[in-house]
Image: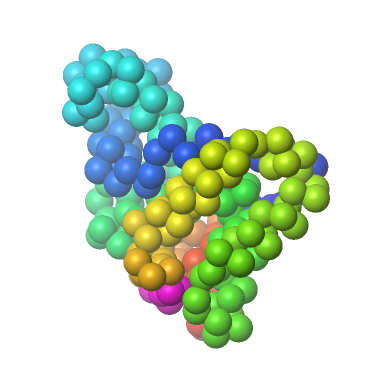
Amino acid sequence: MTETNSQVYILSFTGASLAISESVKIAETYLQLRDWDAVKDKVKSENLLQSRTQGSIQRVYQELEPRLIELNQEQLELLVEGTIQEQKQLLWYAVCKRYAYTREFAIEVIHEKFIRMDYELTDFDYNAFYNRKADWHEELDQVAETTRIKIKKRIFWMLKEAGLITEDNIIIPAVLSKRMVEILALDAPSSYQIFPISISEIQR
């Protein structure tokens, strides 16, 4: 998970939260079928996401599938079989794999503040990050103000869903299980830096 200033940010993550139960159901179906096209067909035909309309099924699935494709088989298996904490952490990892903007915010703001023992996540922190990135990414300058607000709200909401900040936006130290540490090793150290955690503690 590396940062490149030339990379155009994908900002479509406002379409869905971590969607834990839906993501687990999709991952479970993939592990049965091992074919993403077949998964899509089954999700739609059997309404596995229990959505009211075909349109809502389509919207949610289109957002969640690209995130889950970022996970390898071992990670998908842990997503299905793991604890709720592991599921939340894996889905946050999938979001950060898929969306460079979210990943960089997690590493450059959340992780860095945690290391400095500064645990309050503020609007100033977010806006400073956004403005800094907008200097390199024209697409951020071009989004409407309503979209900019949506992006911020979605990131903060997902952080809360993942158990990484409180309702009052206080950063919560992450605890990675031994299984999580091992399963994220492939992308280390950035796979650990998306969490408020001390890398030196993991490496012991």
Residue 69 visible, this orientation: no
Q: Nearer the viewer, residue 28 or 110?
A: 110
Q: Nearer the viewer, residue 10 or 142?
A: 142
Locate residue 71, reporting x and y percent: 46, 43
From this view, report whether residue 57 is shown above or below residue 73.
above
Q: State the image coordinates of residue 66 (x, y, percent, origin top left).
A: 48, 33
Q: In the drawing, does residue 130 fall left or right of residue 4?
A: left
Picture quarter containing residue 190? Answer: bottom right
Does 149 sit above or below residue 32? Answer: below
User: Who is closer to the viewer here, 27 or 140?
Assistant: 140
* Main secondary structure of the magenta stretch: loop
Identify the residue at image location x=38%, y=70%: 168
Identity of the residue drawn at 43% across and 35% down: 15
- Please name whichever residue, 158 or 37, is drawn nearer the observer in this view of the structure: 158
Question: Is there any visible trace of residue 145 in the rendered image?
Answer: yes
Q: Position of residue 99 (x, y in %)?
A: 57, 44
Per the rendered image, the range of residues in magenta is 170-175
Residue occupying image coordinates x 19% and y 19%: 46
The answer to if 172 sits in the magenta stretch is yes
